[in-house]
Image (cartoon, grey):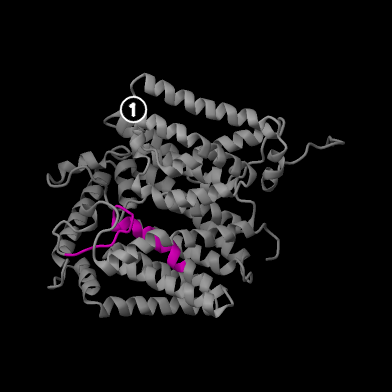
């Protein structure tokens, strides 16, 4: 074995701020970045592709962008906070005025993360950065590869293929980039608590909608049901079923945080927050949300210990009691087995059940006809016309069935492999965090959220959701190294 007398220094992501602070060439990097933005905007205006108003907005955004870049290079974890905000605000598609398809605020921050990593390599004077590659994230790459090959081989149009490929290819890259900006477990704990606090913005909008009974944000046609016989809460999300995904993680985290804190005043505030979020969940009238939240509460009971297990058990009981003693909720749930009632919204609920049943039958039929490679990633919306002329341009409303229909055994095998490694990551974290009062309750809550999200995927197509991937990047930092004591 050859030993070096002076081994090269190891790069520590936690000390990125100190390395960058004394980098003379960083001003050159920032100058080139801003010049590139201004030059690109000028060329777009000169070519007639960008109106002057948009050019003015872009020019004004340059100083703000530079300030954000400096903050990210000085405090790397700041970028993860920005991504939390981006995930919550993406539903508004606030960047649509730029005219760039598929660009959201979260993607802008992730592109900034990639630029910061390049700057980190430059800052290291040639040292390659020591990047972290979580196993659970890498396990998704085979599925991303299957999606890419399937979309390019079977797509009816190249534009359609690119549209559908954005999520399965971009999301694991996003998670890998975000992992590099989290210094350690203590920072990951603070991030989770900050995420819960940030979530109260859309939750607050949803709660006000529930109290006032009117739409405050988002397209009204998506918030009120098609038959206009019942009002559904969506917050700033376009669809009540999308808002549910945020509830699945935030409610267990609030309960775990309340269990963790020693102060009764803080505990009361957190429990009230969980109550308000559950109230907004009820007013979404999302049956998939009710069922998946039930799975999340059951997972809280299953994975928790002591008082936290009791909290999960009580949450399950309260959920069942609410379902049985709230007429609108009970009658909507009974529509799943074909039972009708006279409550508001039941007629639409029955129509929704029949709609989803048609989609499920169509997806299963396509899988039976094309069992190995499917009909091509992103093509279900077009092929469903052969099964019903009343259904056009839609998803299967079931993640697993859609994968089976579009990519056959190849796709579902790769996706199940990814889910297996996610479960192994969660199982490892549950084992290593036992007895740690700071991390164990929050990790159990995250596990419950992922469990509920997996159940929710039975009722919605969730392949494009950013939120689970952002939280997965935080989750891997909550797991201590093997052999260490919490």
Q: In the rendered structure, does residue 8 fall within the stretch colored magenta? A: no
Q: Position of residue 106 (x, y in %)?
A: 45, 44
Q: Is residue 378 above or below residue 442?
A: above
The vertical placement of 469 against 310, above or below, is above
Q: Nearer the viewer, residue 14 or 471?
A: 14
- Determine whether, in the image, residue 68 is placed left or right of residue 457: right
Give me the residue at 32% from left, 51% from top.
461
Span colored in magenta: 230-252
Percent x, y of residue 468: 45, 53
* Residue 288 visible at all: yes
**Label 1, on which residue?**
51
Which residue shows up at 36% across the image and 51% down it? 462
Instruction: Please tell me which residue is depicted at 42% across the width and 80% down the height of the picture.
Output: 314
| Percent position of residue 116, x then y | 59, 37
Dividing the picture into quadrants, the one containing residue 127 is: top right
Residue 455 seen: no
Query: In which quadrant is the N terminus drawn?
Result: top right
Above or below 390: residue 260: below
Q: Secondary structure at mark 1?
A: loop
Whether 237 is among the magenta residues is yes
Residue 250: % across, % down: 44, 64
Rate crowding at label 1 as few (under 14), some (14 to 19) or many (20 or more) other CA atoms within 10 Å: some
Q: Residue at x 64, y 54 (%)?
A: 184
Residue 211 figure quarter: bottom left
Quadrant in which the C terminus is drawn: bottom right
Judge left or right: residue 169 versus residue 210: right
């Amino acid at each position: 074995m050859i030993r070096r007398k002076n081994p090269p220094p190891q790069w520590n992501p936690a000390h990125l701020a100190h390395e960058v602070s004394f980098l003379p060439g960083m001003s050159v990097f920032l100058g080139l970045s801003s010049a590139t933005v201004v030059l690109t905007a000028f060329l777009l205006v000169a070519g007639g592709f960008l109106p002057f108003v948009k050019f003015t907005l872009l020019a004004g955004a340059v100083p703000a962008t530079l300030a954000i870049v400096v903050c990210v290079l000085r405090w790397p974890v700041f970028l993860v906070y920005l991504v939390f905000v981006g995930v919550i605000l993406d539903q508004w598609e606030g960047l649509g005025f730029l005219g760039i398809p598929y660009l959201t605020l979260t993607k802008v921050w992730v592109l900034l993360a990639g630029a910061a990593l390049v700057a980190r390599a430059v800052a290291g004077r040639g040292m390659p950065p020591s990047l972290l590659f979580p196993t659970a994230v890498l396990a998704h790459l085979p599925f991303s590869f299957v999606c890419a090959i399937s979309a390019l081989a079977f797509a009816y149009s190249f534009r359609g293929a690119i549209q559908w490929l954005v999520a399965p290819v971009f999301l694991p890259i996003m998670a890998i980039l975000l992992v590099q900006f989290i210094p350690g477990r203590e920072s990951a704990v603070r991030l989770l608590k900050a995420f819960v606090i940030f979530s109260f913005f859309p939750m607050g909008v949803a709660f006000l909608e529930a109290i006032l009974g009117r739409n405050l944000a988002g397209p009204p046609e998506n918030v009120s049901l098609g038959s206009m016989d019942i009002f559904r809460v969506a917050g700033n999300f376009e669809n009540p079923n999308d808002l549910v995904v945020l509830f699945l993680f935030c409610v267990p985290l609030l309960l775990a945080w309340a269990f963790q804190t020693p102060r009764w005043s803080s505990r009361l505030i957190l429990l009230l927050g969980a109550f308000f979020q559950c109230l907004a969940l009820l007013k979404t009238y999302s049956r998939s949300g009710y069922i998946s939240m039930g799975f999340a509460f059951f997972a809280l009971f299953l994975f928790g210990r002591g008082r936290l297990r009791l909290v999960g058990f009580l949450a399950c009981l309260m959920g069942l009691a609410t379902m049985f003693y709230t007429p609108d909720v009970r009658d909507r749930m009974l529509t799943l087995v074909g039972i009708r009632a006279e409550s508001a919204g039941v007629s639409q609920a029955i129509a929704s059940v029949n709609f989803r049943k048609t989609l499920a039958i169509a997806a299963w039929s396509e899988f039976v006809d094309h069992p190995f490679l499917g009909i091509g990633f992103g093509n279900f919306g077009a092929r469903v016309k052969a099964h019903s002329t009343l259904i056009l341009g839609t998803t299967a409303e079931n993640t697993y069935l859609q994968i089976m229909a579009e990519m056959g055994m190849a796709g579902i095998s790769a996706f199940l492999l990814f889910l297996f490694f996610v479960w192994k990551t969660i199982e490892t974290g549950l084992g290593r965090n036992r007895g740690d009062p700071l991390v164990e309750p929050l990790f159990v809550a995250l596990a419950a959220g992922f469990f509920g999200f997996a159940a929710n995927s039975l009722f919605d197509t969730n392949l494009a959701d950013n939120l689970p991937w952002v939280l997965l990047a935080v989750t891997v930092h909550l797991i201590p190294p093997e052999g260490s004591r919490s």
